[in-house]
Image (spheres, rainbow, N blue to C red):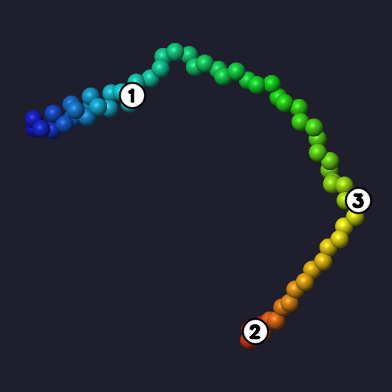
Amino acid sequence: MKTTFALTAVDLIAAGPALAGNKAEPMMEPTLAPVAIAPTPSSPDWTGFYAGGQLGYANIDTNVVF
């Protein structure tokens, strides 16, 4: 019985700081003014020169029946 009482007392003392609270009013953080961002164009400008190419090879051998 003494051991149970001693362990309970130690647990209550150790848990005391977990129950501590702040009685002061919470401080509101200052709000920042919104920053104006220039709008992006709705579609990019695709005018101009373009050169492209593609090389490739595929050999597909399967025995899969659909």
Q: Amino acid at mark 3?
A: Thr
Q: Is residue 65 above or below residue 4?
A: below
Lower position in the chain sequence, tag 3 or tag 2 = 3
Disc 2 target residue: 62
Residue 39 position within the rendered picture, expressed as x and y whole percent measured from the top left: 81, 35
Tag 2's secondary structure?
loop
**Mark whose residue sits in front, 3 or 2:** 3
Q: Amino acid at mark 2?
A: Thr
Tag 3's secondary structure?
loop
Residue 6 position within the rendered picture, expressed as x and y whole percent measured from the top left: 13, 29
Residue 4 position within the rendered picture, expressed as x and y whole percent measured from the top left: 13, 33
For the residues marked 1 and 3, what is the alpha-carbon distance in whole angstroms?
A: 67 Å
For the residues marked 2 and 1, what is the alpha-carbon distance in whole angstroms?
A: 68 Å
Q: Is residue 38 above or below residue 44?
A: above
Disc 3 target residue: 47
Instruction: Name the residue located 91 percent from the left edge and 50 percent from the top edge.
Output: 47
In what quadrant of the picture does the C terminus appear? bottom right
Lower position in the chain sequence, tag 1 or tag 3 = 1
Nearer to the camera, 35 or 18 = 35
In this rendering, would 20 be left or right of 35?
left
> Hey, which quadrant is residue 60 in on the image?
bottom right
Tag 1's secondary structure?
helix
Q: Is residue 56 above or below residue 35?
A: below
Instruction: Name the residue located 44 percent from the left edge and 13 percent from the top edge.
Output: 24
Disc 1 target residue: 19
* Mark 3 Cα shell of 10 Å, populated few (<14), some (14-19), many (≥20): few
Lower position in the chain sequence, tag 2 or tag 1 = 1
Give the farthest residue toward the left.
2
Residue 35 position within the rendered picture, expressed as x and y whole percent measured from the top left: 72, 26
For the residues marked 3 and 2, what is the alpha-carbon distance in whole angstroms?
A: 43 Å
Nearer to the camera, 51 or 40 = 51
